[in-house]
Amino acid sequence: MHTKIKTYFSALTRFSFVFCIFAFASCGFSAGKTCNKDNNDKAEPYNSAGEPNSEKMVVMKFDIKAFNANNKYGVYKFIDTNGMEVEQHVLRKFPSGETESYYEYRCFPDSPYKFYSDYDDKGNIIEYIKSFSTFHVGIGLHYDSIGNIVKEEDFDLPYKFSLEDLIDKMKEEYDVDLLSKKTGSVNRFLEQEHLGIPVYIVNCRITDTPFKHVYIINGTTGEMLYTTKRLVMETDEEKEYVLDEYIRKKANGEL
């Protein structure tokens, strides 16, 4: 397996592990389910760049009373007053069954942005992280027990070619709308072993076909490094991983 996998998982915290479990759920709700609404203050849904207003997404207090009244088997799903899909969970100690902490994630329908919050057993926020598609973005916030920020974590370092730059490039040059999660998926990481640079990998479904376009972009300069076409359901085990393919062809002078 490529070095990127090691780099990716070495950075995961307990909360990040929760993110990985639910990133691929895409905040989906089963058709036909009845969803309740909470009483959070109205938020401005999106800013001028098409990104959800991050400051409005930080819910400082977990509503334990509402959760206890509505959860089923430790999970509570509902639509909030901003039209966001919310899923809340409780973590319990073993074997006592006492509450250890709560966590939730929320997103707007069809938006690749997701917002994750972790709370202590009294419902006080202890961590907040924003993600885009499959990776963390922006500033992650860590709080003390009374809501003061005690640590900030910049997930956008060292990507000089920002996520916003990538969104603009893919739309303007390839007519790919990364702000719709129906388009496909995006990943990014540091490729240290062979290239020594950060990279973005964009998977874009080709409408009405079983294929997807795959793009590799330099995360520092924004240069399009490689494009190819693959079957949507094809796995890395079935065919050479696209980044390895690019590295091999580059080393052999095929590009």
Image (cartoon, helix red, strand yellow):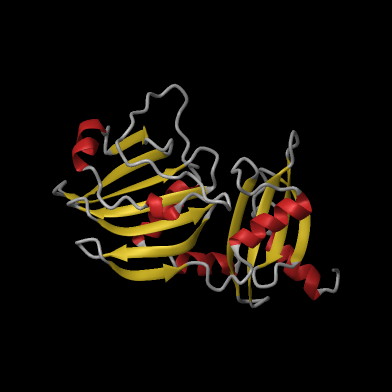
Residue 152 coordinates in the image, percent (x, y): 38, 69
Specify whether 59 is left or right of 131: left
The residue furthest right is 254
- The spot of residue 149 in percent (x, y) is 30, 67
The quarter of the picture where residue 199 lies is bottom right
Which residue is painted at 32% across and 59% down in the image? 127
- Whether residue 249 is visible to the viewer of this picture, yes or no, is yes
* Quadrant in which the N terminus appears: bottom right
Task: Answer left or right for 125 relative to 139.
Answer: left
Q: Nearer the viewer, residue 174 or 228?
A: 174
Visible residue check, residue 239:
no
Q: Residue at x 70, y 64 (%)?
A: 217
Q: Left of 134 or right of it: where is 83?
A: left
Residue ID at (36%, 58%): 128
Say left or right for 132 vs 150: right
With respect to residue 255, does 94 lie above or below? above
Q: Where residue 159 appears, x then y in whole percent?
A: 59, 70
Q: Is residue 245 above or below residue 99?
A: below
Residue at the far top in the pictured view = 32
In front of the other: 32 or 54: 54
Q: At 54% from the left edge and 47% from the top edge, which residue is drawn? A: 112
